[in-house]
Each structure stands twice: as structure tokens, then as C-alpha cells.
Amino acid sequence: MPTRFSKLLLLIAAAMSTAAAPAPHASVATLMSKALADYPGHEATMITVTFPPGAVDPIHRHDAHALVYVLEGAIVMGVRGGRAVTLKPGETFYEGPHDVHTIGRNASKTRPAKFLVVLLKKSGAPILMPAR
């Protein structure tokens, strides 16, 4: 029969293992990519990003103009040198080609969030590049 002390140790161990678990990753779906005839060598790419509860983006950049539109839930966004903002459905965010995206996460630990991103970038360039 477990004692109160052993039950307490089990609860502490469970809490520590939960706290140490890595944050879930975002899910990205490409909706379309289209060459921009008026801008040779460039394309527009449209994606949706779904953040599970508690999801956090790594620090990154896009080397693109990124236009963000929140569809559902709430997200926290920020670029180096700027302030973090919490965005809700219908709100927008912009990242320029030289911005480093230092804050990107789901504002909720219990609800998913989803947003649409339109990227204007060089043809064939990656959507996301790790940064420091």
C-alpha cells in the first residue's frame, strides 16, 4: 500500500516529466505556389500553419515578404527589434525579408490555432530558414 510520501513523489515525478516534454510542432500545408510573371524569378506561396496547443516555433526567417492572417485561435508573434503581439482571428502580421522571427507560438495551452501565410519570395527558395 503506497504511503502519502510515495504518492507525493509520484506526483512530483509526473509533473517534472510533463514539464520537460518538448513543445508540439506546427503543421504546415502548402495550398498553392505560383510564379509571378511580372516579377521574373519570384513566386507567391500560400500556406496554412496549424499550431497545436502549446506549440512554439524555432527562431527563423523567411527571406520573403510574409503576410499572416489568423483564421482561428490566438498566436503570439514577434520579430527581432519589435514587440510581441497577440493576434486573434481576422488580425494580421507582416514579416519582411530581413526580419528574424524570434517569437512564434500558440497563445493557448489548450486550444489549437491556425493561420494563413502568403509568402512573396525568390522562386525555389525555402519557406523557412533557421536563424539565431
Image (spheres, rainbow, N blue to C red):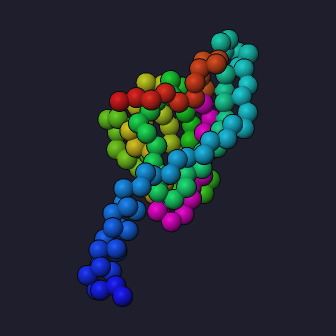
Residue 33 on the magenta span: no
Q: Give the range drawn in magenta.
A: 108-119
* Side of 4 relative to 54 (left or right): left
Residue 117 on the magenta span: yes
Dividing the image into 4 quarters, which one contains the N terminus? bottom left
Residue 72: image x %, image y %?
Answer: 60, 57
Relative height, residue 30 to residue 129 (above, below): below
Relative height, residue 39 to residue 109 (above, below): above
The image quarter in which residue 124 lies: top right
- Does residue 29 appear in the picture of this structure? yes
* Side of 47 relative to 101 (left or right): right
Residue 66: image x %, image y %?
Answer: 55, 33
**At 50% across and 23% down in the image, what residue appears?**
63
**At 57% across and 37% down in the image, what residue appears?**
67
Residue reaching furthest to the top:
40
Seen from the viewer's position, the closer of residues 119 and 3 is 3
Residue 83: image x %, image y %?
Answer: 34, 44
* Side of 65 relative to 20 (left or right): right
Seen from the viewer's position, the closer of residues 18 and 56 is 18
Dividing the image into 4 quarters, which one contains the C terminus? top left
Residue 98: image x %, image y %?
Answer: 43, 24
- Does residue 90 appear in the picture of this structure? no
**At 55% across and 46% down in the image, what residue appears?**
26
* Side of 125 relative to 57 (left or right): right
Residue reaching furthest to the left:
5
**At 67% across and 27% down in the image, what residue appears?**
44
